[in-house]
Image (tube, helix red, strand yellow):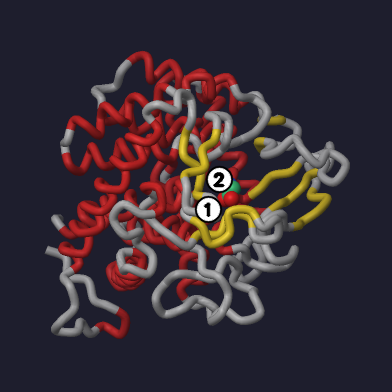
Amino acid sequence: MLTLLSAGGVRAQSEEPLAAVIERALARAREQAQIMARALEPLEGRLPRTTDEAGRLVTSDPGWWCSGFFPGVLWYLYEDSGDERFAAYAAGMTRRLEKVQYITDNHDVGFMLFCSYGNGWRLQGFPEEYRQVLLTGAASLATRYDPRIGLIRSWDFNRDRWHYPVIIDNMMNLELLLWASRMSGERRYRRMAVSHADKTLKNHFRDDASCYHVVSYDADGRVEKRETWQGLHDESAWSRGQGWALYGFTYMYRETGHRRYLRQAVRVADYLLGHPAMPSDGIPPWDLDVADPQTALRDASAAAVIASALIELSGYVDAARGARYLSFAERQLRTLSSERYLAAPGTHAGFILKHSVGFFAQHSEVDKPLTYADYYYVEALLRMKKRLSR
Ligand code: GLY
């Protein structure tokens, strides 16, 4: 049995065992997810997004980039509990995303389909219907790859500002292409994913391993701009973006075995863990370059993404580094599972975590529950639970 140490390597006598923290958090997640699933059942075609100022559920249509996260939460809760009610809820919510497979006007198809249909395919005995949706989704995503540039185009808006924008978040959508390549034998999907990751590795990162949010390319594939969209400023380190980078290069290593991706994931992890603005409880401010990290709003979603990625990455590195990553992820999960972040039963419209930051500069979803915080938190809980039982 793995023993994880809290910050400083000393566990207080009174500290709740990590396994108990995880079970308590998963029980809360099940309670909250059922509330949300019941509320959504009569709202045909709608998926959760956040809450409004009064704490009421705000929904989206399936075309919003976050539509796959709640189905994914339900699949994970089914995986953990074996409770068929969660499989039924998950299947119902997943079905709402059926048309997403045809979306070609943005890169988020990977997030949307892999969290919903992807988890469902894995947990439901590999249904052909799900496989087809995922393969069509991959084909749609692949239409956004320009071979002259060697990357997937993330967005189509702001065409007068960016010729060919690629955002760090786009790293998260390559997993669908790698899966589709294995399933269909279409080698080009894998080549696209590797090319995209290689060019991101080359062009998105600063010397200190932090990354830009948006890199725009000209028609010949040369970098024309490095900017931010959701971060504090162009040269800042937007916290969730650093999380997407860490998570993306970690699974790229898992899927390809290319050590350059492992090295990059380690560089990003070490940058994050050593950052002076990273609080000791492991929940970063929404941007690591905020003027005062002590008082700035924290982003639970970034913490959840980082925690989940660190747990996976800890299995690919040497024992000492792995222990450091696990210890940090443990701290993050303990903090997220405290009453400060974990929604009280029956509150926050069934969301699991409080205090995430969507788009600070646009005053959109600031200090709110968000579906992707819940998804990566539950994923991290399951990953940590598996580590503890090894
Ligand atoms: N992918 C959009 C975001 O992380 O806010």
Q: In the orientation shown, which residue stands out farthest toward the right? A: 160
Secondary structure of residue under mark 2? helix
Q: Is residue 192 left or right of residue 381?
A: right
- Depth check: 179 or 298 in front? 298
Task: Check the picture and name the quadrant holding the C terminus.
Answer: bottom left
Q: Which residue is mark 1?
A: 244
Question: Residue 228's quadrant in the figure?
Answer: bottom right
Task: Check the picture and name the quadrant holding the N terminus.
Answer: bottom left
Residue at the spot 49% in from the left edge and 34% down from the top edge: 112
- Depth check: 211 or 344 in front? 344
Tell me if label 1 and label 2 are in contact, CB under 8 Å: yes
- Depth check: 199 or 337 in front? 337
Residue at the spot 57% in from the left edge and 35% down from the top edge: 64
Q: Which residue is mark 2?
A: 171
Q: In the orientation shown, which residue stands out farthest toward the front? A: 54
Amino acid under disc 2: Met
Q: Which circle's residue, 1 or 2, is located before the other in the chain?
A: 2
Is residue 242 at least partly visible in the picture?
A: no
Residue at the spot 61% in from the left edge and 35% down from the top edge: 107
The x, y position of residue 44, in whole percent, is 45, 23
For label 1, being within 8 Å of ligand 1 is answered: yes
Mark 1, other Cα within 10 Å: few <14 / some 14–19 / many ≥20: many
